[in-house]
Structures are given as C-alpha cells and as structure tokens.
Amino acid sequence: MININEVLETNKMVEEETLDVRTITMGINLLECADHDLDTCCKKIYDKITTLARNLVATGEDISREIGIPIVNKRVSITPISLVGGACCQTPEDYVKIAKSLDKAAKDLGINFLGGYSAVVSKGMTRSDELLIRSIPQAMKETERICASVNVGSTKTGINMDAVRLMGQIIKETAEATREHDSLGCGKLVVLCNAPDDNPFMAGAFHGVSEDDAIINVGVSGPGVVHHVLKEIRGASFEILCETIKRTAFKITRVGQYVAQEASRRLGVPFGIIDLSLAPTPAVGDSVADILCEIGLEHPGAPGTTAALALLNDQVKKGGVMASSYVGGLSGAFIPVSEDQGMIDAVTCGALTLEKLEAMTCVCSVGLDMIAIPGDTPASIISGIIADEAAIGMINQKTTAVRIIPVVGKSIGETVEFGGLLGYAPVMPVNRYSCEAFINRTGRIPAPIHSFKN
C-alpha cells in the first residue's frame, strides 16, 4: 500500500518542477443505454453518465487540496458510441443529437472533456460505424467538450484502408466545419491503430467493451521533473542517465497510484490503470523536447533524436511498472507539437520535420500529434499520412495515432493559436507528391505474419 509520506516527498516536484496528475478519467459502460428510440437512448446516456460521475470533479479537487498536488483534468470516457447508437441512429444527424446530449452531460458535470464519440473499424465498418464517422464534422462543430476517435487498424487485423481513405475526407470536412476557430475541431479528433481500451488521455480515450461497468483510470505526467533531475547529472554515463530516469518515473507513478486508489475508494468505482506518460503542456519547463535536449541534442530532430527518445520512453516504462501493478493506457512519452514549447521551437528553426516526427513515433507512445498543416492539403495526402502511422503501429505491435489539423486559410510558416492546453503551432510543410492511386484502392492491408500467434 502507498502512504501519504511517499506523496509528500514530491512537494518539491510540484512547487519547482511542474509535477501534476494530468487526469482522473472515469470510464463508463453505456451498452445498456442502447434503445430503438433516439430520445430514450439520449436520456439513458445522460442519466447514467451524470449519475456515476456526479462526484468526479469534487473528489478530484478534494484529493488535490489534501495532498497538495494539482490534478489538472477530470474527464469521462465512454463505450464507443457507434456501438450504443446503432439501433436508433439512421442518419449522421441522429448521432449529432447523441453528441449534444454527451456535451450537455460533460458541461453539467464540469469535466474538461468526454471521450468515446468513437468507432472501432480496424477490420470493417458497420452501417452504424459509417454513420457515426460521417457525423464527426458536424458533431465537432456543435459541441465543445466531446472528443472523437476512430481505430482503423491493429496488429491482429491489419489496416482498413477504406476507413483510412474516409478519415482523410472527414478530417478535411471537420477542418472546414470549424474554420472560424482555426479548424480546432480536428484537435479533438484522432485516428488510431491498436487503440487501447483503457487510455485516460484525450482525444483517443474510450471505454472498451472488455472493461468493468465503471472504472477509474489516472494519467500522470512530469516532464519537468525528469528534466530537472537530468540537469543534475549532466554529462553522466548512459547507465546513470537510465537509472535516474527510472527512479524519477517510479516516484511520479507512485503519486498517480495514490490518487487513483483514493479516487476509487471515495467514488466507489474500481481502480483500472495508471498511464505513466510524460505529457507536456505549453508551460515553460514542462517539455519532453527539453528532456531530449538535456540528454544531449541541440534540438529535437537532430541526428540521435530517435535513439534518445527510445531511451527515455523505455526507462519511463521500466520505472513505472515497478511502482504500480496495473500500468496501461499509452504509457511513455508524448511528442505533440502544439503542446510542447520545445517542439514548437524545433519546428520553427527547421530542426524538426514531419518526416523526422514520423521516425520518432516508431519508439514513443503515440504518433503524429497536434500537428498543423496547410489547409489546402488534399484529403488523399492526409489519408497517406494516416496509413503510414497505422503501418508503424501494426508492424511494431504498438499504439500509433494521427491528430493532424489542416488549418483552413493558413499556409506554411504561419502560426495558429488553439488556446489552453492545446497551445499554438507553426504550420508545417507536407510532402505534396500524390499517393491518391494508392489510397483509392479498396479493401484492407492484411495483418503482418507475426500477428499469427494462435
């Protein structure tokens, strides 16, 4: 068991090194809310979410106040809505009505985001899946706190290229639908391969069908803490470097474990997992890029970046799994561009390109995250980028994702402001050579040979 003294050891991390618990996320199963009547389905969904999560925000704030550690976000993830709305939704507009009910529930609870406006289509799309996917642009336009995700592939099933092609179009439509807000709707939409059922981080969170009726998942962070301790051992050997990261990740994860256990006990909901990801914010000193520089790079993107990130990711996981028996979600290092000032600086000075970011995603937790590209980028090129990332995830048996924002009216070198946790980003160049003939093939890319383990 964890005692409060372990947590109090981290006070300096909070005061000087921007340690926080990034999110408490309650996962909620909505399968019992399915109904042939749309209004009844919406009411059941609203009632179950607001009943189970009614004390989520207050509990998070109470724990934060008692232990002196910020708990930045309180969120809810739900069963992929394409599974819940299949019986009553006959048009994309029907799904938008569910999205509005979800958004009302999120606002009434006071949570930051609600994830699970989602479809899992790694092998094929049902009619319900396709209707939900086609509703995403309007749903993102007409809601504030809803996050959408679509899983288009897995190591076991291969990549559904029909879904990849469709998602390129949907991202373009979402960008256009939210153009008045710099296409921000795309910042709440992610396309995944090998999506985990228990991820507490948005926008890719949903409550998988293998989960309990309700669950508490906690995402911890602390890139500022890791950066600080690495400054104290500057120039040390790789052995000392790795041991230092592992010990720090252990301490950070113990904080998350304590928060998760307390939230679970007070809310009467089982504890699920700790996601021990290093998740940056736009705040100075809270950057994964700064860690890479402290390891020895002039800027992220320099030769050696992929190796340094692989080292960091692995040591974070090794330290975290010693601190908790239930590690899940994504767990590792996020490398979003807009949410990390060091990444923004690297892009601005030309050290970091889209192609180098893709290489880095082979060894980190997620993928191409919060990247702004020119608004006139063709849908087929966006689909090609999604296919590349899905292939990395499929072959390497890991989660990868694309959260890319074709900002309508913006071109290379301009800056787009998203605000809050999402920060700002320079518009990055994209390889404009066509992949349309490849993307327009129908069907799916088969699963790799090493997927066959029965």
Image: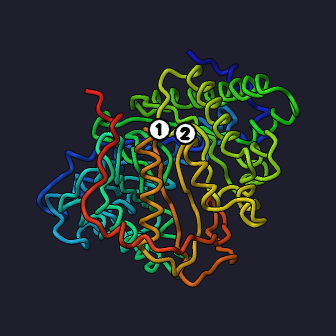
Q: Is residue 426 above or below residue 408?
A: above
* Residue pictured at 78% horizontal, 65% vertical: 349
Can residue 107 be seen? no
Quadrant occupied by the C terminus: top left
Mark 2 Cα shell of 10 Å, populated few (<14), some (14-19), many (≥20)? many
Residue behind mark 1? 329
From the viewer's perspective, tell me whether residue 57 is left or right of residue 441. right
Q: Position of residue 186 (x, y in %)?
A: 48, 67
Three-letter amino acid code at the position of disc 1: Gly
Q: Residue at x 76, y 31 (%)?
A: 11
Above or below, 177 against 6 in this view is below
Q: Are the residues tagged 2 and 1 within 8 Å (C-beta)?
A: yes
Residue tagged 2:
219
Which sits in the foreground, 3 or 58? 3
Question: How far apart are labels 2 and 1 at the CA level?
Answer: 8 Å
The residue type indicated by label 2 comes to Gly
Tell me the element at label 2.
strand
Compared to 318, does 427 lie above or below?
Answer: below
Residue 128, given in percent of the width and then of the height, sits at 20, 61
Res. 438 visible in picture: yes
Q: Quadrant of residue 71?
A: top right
x, y percent for residue 295: 79, 39
In the image, 166: left or right of 306? left
